[in-house]
Image (spheres, rainbow, N blue to C red):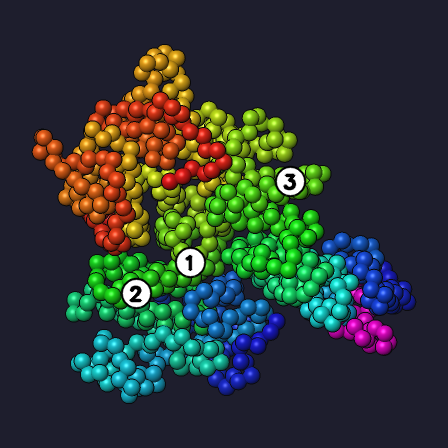
Amino acid sequence: MNRRNRGSSSSSSSSRVSNTYGNRQLSDNPRAGSGGGAIDSFRRRADVVPVKRNNDKDESDNKGEDLTDVSFIVGTCSSMCPERERVTRERLRDLAVFERLYGNPSKSSTDLAVKKFCRTLSAADVQASDVRPLPVLEETLKYLLSLLDSREHPFEVVHDFIFDRTRSIRQDLSIQNLANERVIYLYEEMVKFHVISHKRLQSCSGTSISPMHHLNMEQLAKTLTSLYNIYDANRKSDSTHENEAEFRSLYVLLHLNPSSGVMGEPLSLWFRKLTFALVKSKEICFVRNLLRFYRMGNYKNFLSRIASEATYLQYCISEPHIREMRSVAVQYINSVCYKLQPYSLLRLSQNLMMKELDVESLCHDCGLETCTDSDGFTVLTTKQSTFRSPEDKFKVYDLIGIERMKR
Amino acid sequence: MAYVSMGEAHRRITEYLNRFCDAVSYQDSSTLCRLLSFSSNSPPLLSLADALNLFQDASSSLIRQSDKFSEYGEILAPLFRSLQSYRVGNLVEAYLAFDKFANAFVQEFRNWESAWALEALHVVCYEIRVLAEKADHKELTCNGKSPEKLKAAGSLLMKVFGLLAAGKGPKRLGALYVTCQLFKTYFKLGTVNLCPSVIRSIETARIFDFEEFPRRDKVTYMYYTGRLEVFNENFLAADTKLSYALQYCNPKREGNIRMILKYLIPVKLSIGVIPKDDELLQNYNLHEYTKIVQALRKGDLRLLRHALQEHEDRFLRSGVYLVLEKLELQVYQRLMKKIYIIQKQSDPARAHQLKLEVIAKALRWLEMDMDLDEVECIMTILIHKNLVKGYLAHKSKVVVLSKQNPFPKLNGKPVGS
């Protein structure tokens, strides 16, 4: 239809290639060497179906375009950061700590500089030399994730850097409309980053943590959505990608609470779109059960199932709800139990998959008093009127059973 | 395609052109509707299409050759192209041309002061949506492409909606029909998150009453907004809207009534309104709900689980699965009540004490194995949510029921928390 957003009249760059069946950076071998221009007309679906631009290109939406006739850039930048950007940022002393050569705020190198996320990008301004092709993006991500173990800097700083630079990776992927299997792997790793950050940010302190946390959640949701689109674009008949069920299950866990305000559609609608194979998968069945327990308020089954069956990623996303269910349990027990039979904290700790000392702490967080009974056991007297939801939104108590989870 | 002579083709095309232009000149909306309604597959339209396919591009010269026709050249040329493509099954081309036609038509509609062509505009809206759906379906099944034409149709509909909603009087009243077309589009695409902005425009209309809209449109509107409330689990609002739709729906339209009931029944069940018999379900062929209702009446958890499993796919697709799953707590309540009634018959003095062991035994009979900790957890929930009145003596492993009204009815409100 219309090519109005493409700026095609200014195509001086010879690396804009008309896309009908043209050179695409696709390869049948995942993560094979240099991904040369293998023309793969059998994968038309992956080529031509656009990855929905839910991530960062709010500017040049390609709505209403006739997709058989659109040109996508093929990037030619061979380092993690385009040369001209690196030079500019060196000059402006706009280098992150990780990018500084020997700590020098105005000197970087091709091994250290990583392309920044640029919000005001419009398709007409982009040059192929600024865009990194898939193999370079893969190396870049690998490098970025290796920084996660850095002990030199506080986690917030590490997170902030990787957060921004992975957003740039997603931007480059999107501009080039890359949506093949190798890209799936990249998105999965980026989702993992956001999930683990979600957990680790909670044990950090500082005023910037809460907005950081919120932004992280936002990008987590966006990255997940893009990942799902790519799964769909690569689907042959009713097949499911290797890790797809687990990554789909994360969406359910993000939306356990309908009023949580997390971006996305209500679960009832979301389930409609799942393939039969996904609905029946172990991971989706697992989270559907969790959903049922959560909505019912069944703290016992919710907590014990997570402890015994969740993967590490699922656990990380569920942490807020684990906190919630534990408070709910304390609330319920306080309100329904017979006043003359105080509730043993040991018993409570077993039901809530917590250490006994943590349970005591939780009760206090909820404004309730505990005491010792005549046998020396710590108990919670019930029907106290002072119950309130814990104030500290981020305090985490260990989940007994978490040790079995692979990280 | 039937054989048509050049002379006959010429005649048909010219006749159509005359009809179209006369309809516009005399503001004859109903004729115009008939002329634009592709999906009706009416013989005159089909025979026109055959004629056009014979003439091919020469038809545009026919349009240009007369001042009377060429005035509407921008509208007629793409309309003809669309009809030609439609006739030979080239649905994507048909859609693209129809989209051009529709845009030109809307432009012209803007220029006509009065709302005489409102009905025709509605026809255009309907046709473009249906055509887009057909084109997408074909693209999906033949080429595996995902739907984009319907998205584009949605943009056009949004444009028309904006135009009408900003207008006055009869133009404004015509906006609700387009809203409903938009709903159908968004629901089909799954982009229901786009509905709220449209709803806001309708519901903040201060100049006149919702009641002034045509009845048919109101029913459709309430149906879709009711469904949205179901997805968001606002059961009271869903009840109000879907009940309105049911009340004012034409009773002869059984298909539509069934569609409304499909969503209204789970909502009613969620607020504790259970049909006394199965007549409604049978009359409207809603058998998937039979076992669910039975489970609620009998307190049979196993039956509920079984029913959910049996129709899992159907419930997931229609989006009511999560709503029905939530009924579990009400089924538990009913079960507890049954245990209580049985105990009352054998030992009235102690009937108000429900031993956790007894409850566990009952659940085992229903093939649900739970340890006492789990049973205790369930009872805690039931008491807290006011489905059971009483308290839990956990050391004695007993639930002590209140002497008065130990199993309060929901009374039209969803289970609280």
Element on which disc 3 rests: helix
Residue B208 is inside the magenta segment: no
Q: CA distance from mark 3 to mark 1?
A: 35 Å
The Cα–Cα distance between marks 3 and 2, rounded to whole angstroms, is 50 Å
Estimate how packed mark 3 is, as few (under 14), some (14 to 19) or many (20 or more) residues with alpha carbons within 10 Å: few
Farthest top residue in view: B346
Residue drawn 44% across the image and 45% down it: A279
Chain bearing tag 3 is B
Q: Is residue A255 visible?
A: yes
Q: In the image, is B14 to the left or to the right of B148?
A: right
Residue A1 in picture, x, y percent from top left: 61, 71
Determine which residue is flagged by label 3.
B247
Please give the residue where the numbered disc 1 appears in the rendered image: A263
Q: Which mark is residue B284?
A: none
Quadrant of res B59: bottom right
Label 1 resides on the chain identified as A
Q: The C terminus of chain B is located in which quarter?
A: top left
